[in-house]
């Protein structure tokens, strides 16, 4: 008898909870991005100053973000921070609204080197927030040779000691670069050749992982890695002896950016937030926490001395003709990439 | 006879011990001074302190427990009743429904999550606790259903028949005879369903609303950025809490038995 | 007589109504959606086009993807085999305990479930990591002199799979063995049967339903579990689950992911059908 009672109570509870939906309050900002993109202090101080509560919701992959944004028909979320290539799709799908830059007092603080990129050439929809660069990081204590480019990763001395991130486009891209191709080539034959070249790398690969790859480098599980910039920063802070290499074949970089969804429930709050994090002092705080390159030129000098070198791109980079962003490619090329990537992973596990 | 019984107990003990090893590691590292899990920085209670100040974590915990309770209750009712009906009589479409109900187990969570999300938005359901409960119930039902059915299939029908012959209405027979006999299977089914629900990440990510964050989602997103030992601390506490509840229940049961 | 049977059927219908309703609404619906999706064409950028195609299913027969199915089956069989080897004796011995101990072991078994499975997996990483707990133990015992590379290997994935799936087998075998009348086994022994024969003819036969439902609860999910291969295998072992995730997320090819899922579904259905045939054999 008792069991039946408790069961029915639970059901009633569930039903009552299901029926109570909450309307977005005027003083709430729904922020949608990965975890740990903003320090809690910044979010708290924003709320303190403006009275707007920040509802910090997360996604794990850009694609999840797009799926949820689509299901929400461009509503529900006020500010979204995501990767460049997915924003291109968001804009194409009509899910972002044009920005009225007049509402952003600190708009001029943005470092123009990171603007006008492929995904938003006229800077109508986005404000950059952090940039990343594909570098090779290695531990000179365990790796006996000098590494100057992607090609060196194929060296047999690196057997079973290389870690890479779980991104087909980036890692296939490594092989493409070694073969002298573009990251964004639509040539299926070139992609196939890159796949073959990449499979030769398989014996050297110990690890394919997106999260906390720096831990494995620091603990000695791997000797060299191709990682996300924030991971590089964390690794360098923990072990300044590690060497960072800007690959001679050409540097790939990417940008993250803010945008406001087309039907955001509270766009005013969104503008206030975006402007808030453009303030130089706040910006510096964010990048110190985030570990990606600072896209705010006025914040650059405010970044802590020991971190400044890690969070700003070297001078030579701006003029490097070989630097390229990984953009979107036609579906058949993407399919070819996927096949090559799957074959590569299988070869690593064999 | 006696010395043959030593081996089974040793075996049980060994397997159980191995199952607990990672948990002990989790508990141990909740006291780790260092933030990075690869380094032991010394003993510290700072993560527990951080935990108690983290309101979002507790809200996520609350959501998860409510969700788990509701889903396992719903799955328990639907699955048990369904198992009963299907073993008692040959009904039309029985095989098909049985197969369909087990579907959530046969399809990878990622696609299930996407499909549920697409389907829910197709029929216009708002994302939140409601959709979470629906999705969780869907993948919890097979656990209850299968375990209860397996139990019923092998059960001796004569007891229930005897009760019925003695004039008891089917409802009475159900509650007083069949239900108590199948109780262990229902209980283990529901316990399993609850465990599945409070651990689900992928499906929850897709069908949850903006306001509802669950604990496994929070753990998952935090693991992706770096295991803050705060999560270890929470799991340690949950582990201890569960242990305490079980010990208490056992103690109370023994007390009740002693009184009888 | 007929009236009573009809009344019985009436009650039966009432009890299955919730299950029928829920299943048809919330499972059949999404399933139909998935099937339809698998026949559509992907849009260039994002989403799908309402254009019928069989390309998605044809695509499965590419050697690289067939190989993935093969790998998944191999791992599933290996994991399931180990789970049966370890879990069946456990469930069996557990059923032989006194009622007092049965409850205790059951609780001990279930409690780890209330700790996040993700976190427990990371616990294994801390243990197996180069220079981690296991390594230090081996070195302290002088069995090895330098760190082993245990992590991010195929065996590590198998350990992870077995660890995750074991309780399901144990519970299933237990719930079946629990109602086993052990006096029957004794009787067989008394009649002169060897322990092995007694086990095979009496115990195994009677616990077969539990074993088979355990196989289902183990084998079926093992094909789709991708995060274990992800975390413990360093993402080098590509299973169907990983593939579907990759296709759904990175490749944004929803129809293909749906087709892969349907293929997986058909595969596991065949397995279920086989296991049901087997369970009907002993009469």
Image (cartoon, coloured by chain):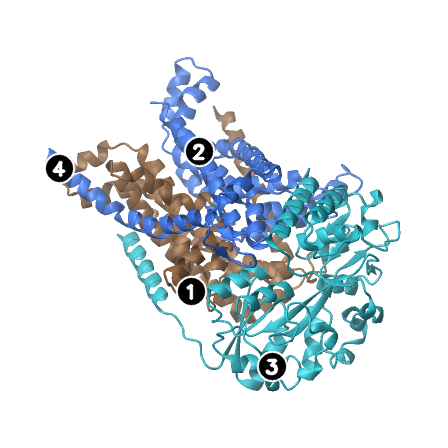
Circle 4 SS class: helix
Same subunit, tags 1 and 4:
no
How far is the residue under mark 1 from the one under mark 2?
Answer: 36 Å
User: Is the Cβ of the residue at disc 3 closer than 8 Å to that at disc 4?
Assistant: no
Judged left or right of residue A203, residue C20 is left
Residue at the spot of label 1: B128
Marks 1 and 4: which is nearer the front? 1
Which color is chain A depicted in? cyan
User: Residue C243, position in %: x, y?
Assistant: 58, 46
Residue identified by numbered label 3: A45
Which of labels 3 and 2 is toward the front? 2
Q: Residues within 10 Å of mark 4 (few under 14, many from 20)?
A: few
| Same chain letter for marks 3 and 4 | no
Disc 1 secondary structure class: loop
Tag nearer the camera, 2 or 4: 2
User: Which residue lies under the disc numbered 2?
Assistant: C270
- Residue with the most extreme top position: C192
From what the image shows, is residue B248 above or below residue A98? above
- Compared to residue C69, the image places residue C274 above or below, namely above
Residues indicated by labels 3 and 2 sit on the same polypeptide chain: no
Residue B136's disc number: none
Q: Mark 3: few, some, or many residues within 10 Å (few <14, many ≥20)?
A: few
Examine the image and state in which quarter residue A212 appears.
bottom right
For the residues labelled 2 and 4, the Cα–Cα distance comes to: 38 Å
> Can you tell which chain is drawn blue?
C
Foreground pick, A206 / C188: A206
Q: Secondary structure at mark 2?
A: helix
Number of marks present in the image shown: 4
x and y, in percent, of residue A277 in the image: 64, 79
Q: Which residue is mark 4?
A: C4
């Amino acid at each position: 008898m008792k069991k039946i009672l408790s069961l029915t109570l639970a059901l009633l509870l569930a039903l009552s909870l299901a029926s109570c939906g909450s309307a977005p309050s005027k003083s709430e900002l729904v922020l949608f991005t990965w975890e740990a993109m903003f320090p809690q202090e910044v979010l708290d101080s924003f709320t303190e100053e403006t009275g707007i509560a920040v509802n910090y919701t997360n996604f794990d992959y850009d694609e999840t973000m797009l799926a949820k944004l689509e299901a929400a028909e461009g509503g529900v979320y006020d500010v979204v921070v995501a990767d460049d290539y997915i924003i291109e799709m968001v804009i194409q799908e009509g899910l972002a609204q044009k920005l009225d830059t007049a509402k952003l007092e600190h708009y001029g603080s943005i470092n123009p080197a990171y603007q006008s990129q492929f995904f938003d050439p006229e800077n109508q929809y986005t404000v950059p927030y952090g940039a990343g660069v594909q570098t090779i990081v290695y531990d000179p204590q365990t790796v006996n040779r000098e590494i100057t480019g992607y090609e060196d990763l194929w060296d047999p001395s690196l057997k079973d000691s290389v870690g890479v991130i779980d991104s087909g486009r980036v890692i296939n891209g490594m092989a493409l670069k070694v073969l002298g191709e573009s990251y964004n080539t639509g040539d299926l034959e070139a992609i196939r050749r890159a796949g073959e070249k990449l499979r030769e790398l398989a014996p050297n690969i110990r690890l394919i992982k997106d999260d906390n790859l720096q831990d494995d480098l620091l603990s000695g599980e791997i000797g060299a890695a191709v990682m996300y910039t924030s991971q590089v920063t964390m690794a360098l802070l923990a072990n300044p002896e590690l060497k960072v290499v800007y690959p001679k074949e050409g540097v790939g970089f990417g940008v993250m950016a803010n945008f406001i969804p087309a039907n955001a429930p509270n766009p005013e709050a969104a503008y206030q937030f975006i402007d808030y994090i453009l303030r130089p002092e706040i910006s510096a705080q964010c990048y110190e926490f985030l570990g990606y390159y600072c896209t705010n030129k006025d914040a650059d000098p405010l970044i802590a001395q020991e971190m400044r070198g890690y969070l700003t791109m070297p001078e030579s980079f701006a003029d490097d003709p070989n630097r390229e962003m990984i953009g979107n490619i036609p579906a058949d090329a993407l399919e070819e990439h996927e096949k090559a990537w799957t074959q590569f992973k299988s070869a690593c596990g064999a | 006879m006696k010395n043959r019984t030593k081996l089974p107990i040793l075996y049980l003990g060994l397997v159980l011990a191995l199952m607990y090893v990672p948990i002990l590691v989790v508990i141990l590292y909740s006291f780790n001074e260092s933030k990075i899990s690869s380094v032991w920085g010394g003993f510290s209670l700072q993560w527990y302190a951080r935990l108690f100040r983290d309101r979002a974590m507790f809200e996520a915990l609350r959501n998860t427990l409510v969700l788990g309770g509701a889903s396992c209750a719903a799955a328990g009712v639907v699955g048990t009743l369904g198992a009963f009906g299907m073993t008692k009589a040959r009904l039309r479409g029985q095989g098909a429904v049985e197969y369909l109900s087990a579907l959530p187990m046969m399809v990878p969570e990622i696609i299930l999550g996407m499909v549920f999300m697409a389907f829910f938005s197709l029929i216009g359901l708002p994302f939140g606790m409601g959709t979470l409960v629906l999705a969780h119930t869907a993948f919890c039902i097979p656990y209850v259903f299968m375990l209860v059915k397996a139990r019923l299939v092998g059960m001796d029908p004569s007891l229930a028949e005897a009760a019925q012959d003695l004039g008891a209405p089917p409802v009475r027979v159900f509650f007083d005879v069949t239900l108590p006999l199948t109780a262990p299977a229902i209980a283990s089914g529901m316990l399993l369903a609850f465990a599945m629900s409070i651990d689900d990440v992928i499906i929850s990510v897709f069908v949850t609303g903006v306001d509802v964050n669950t604990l496994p989602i929070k753990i998952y997103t935090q693991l992706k950025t770096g295991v803050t030992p705060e999560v270890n601390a929470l799991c340690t506490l949950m582990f201890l809490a569960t242990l305490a509840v079980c010990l208490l229940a056992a103690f109370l049961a023994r007390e009740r038995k002693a009184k009888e | 007589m007929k009236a009573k049977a009809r009344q019985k059927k009436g009650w039966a219908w009432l009890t299955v109504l919730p299950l029928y309703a829920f299943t048809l609404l919330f499972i059949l619906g999404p399933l139909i959606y998935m099937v339809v999706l698998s026949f559509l064409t992907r849009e260039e950028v994002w989403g799908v086009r309402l254009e019928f195609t069989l390309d998605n299913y044809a695509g499965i027969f590419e050697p690289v993807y067939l190989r993935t199915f093969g790998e998944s089956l191999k791992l599933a069989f290996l994991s399931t085999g180990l789970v049966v080897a370890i879990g069946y004796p456990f469930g069996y011995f557990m059923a032989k305990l006194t009622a007092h101990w049965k409850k205790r072991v059951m609780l001990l078994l279930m409690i780890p479930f209330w700790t996040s499975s993700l976190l427990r997996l990371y616990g294994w990483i801390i243990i197996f990591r180069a220079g981690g707990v296991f390594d230090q133990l081996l070195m302290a015992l002088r069995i090895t002199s330098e760190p082993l590379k245990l992590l991010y290997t195929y065996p590590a994935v198998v350990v992870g799979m077995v660890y995750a799936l074991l309780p399901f087998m144990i519970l299933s075998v237990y719930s079946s063995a629990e109602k086993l009348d052990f006096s029957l086994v004794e009787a067989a022994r008394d009649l002169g049967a060897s322990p092995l024969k007694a086990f095979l003819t009496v115990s195994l036969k009677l616990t077969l339903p539990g074993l088979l439902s355990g196989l289902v609860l183990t084998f079926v999910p093992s094909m789709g579990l991708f995060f274990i291969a992800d975390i413990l295998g360093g993402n080098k072992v590509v299973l169907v689950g990983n593939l579907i995730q990759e296709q759904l997320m990175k490749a944004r090819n929803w129809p293909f992911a749906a087709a892969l899922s349907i293929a997986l579904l058909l595969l596991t259905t065949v397995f279920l059908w086989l296991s049901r045939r087997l369970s009907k054999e002993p009469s």
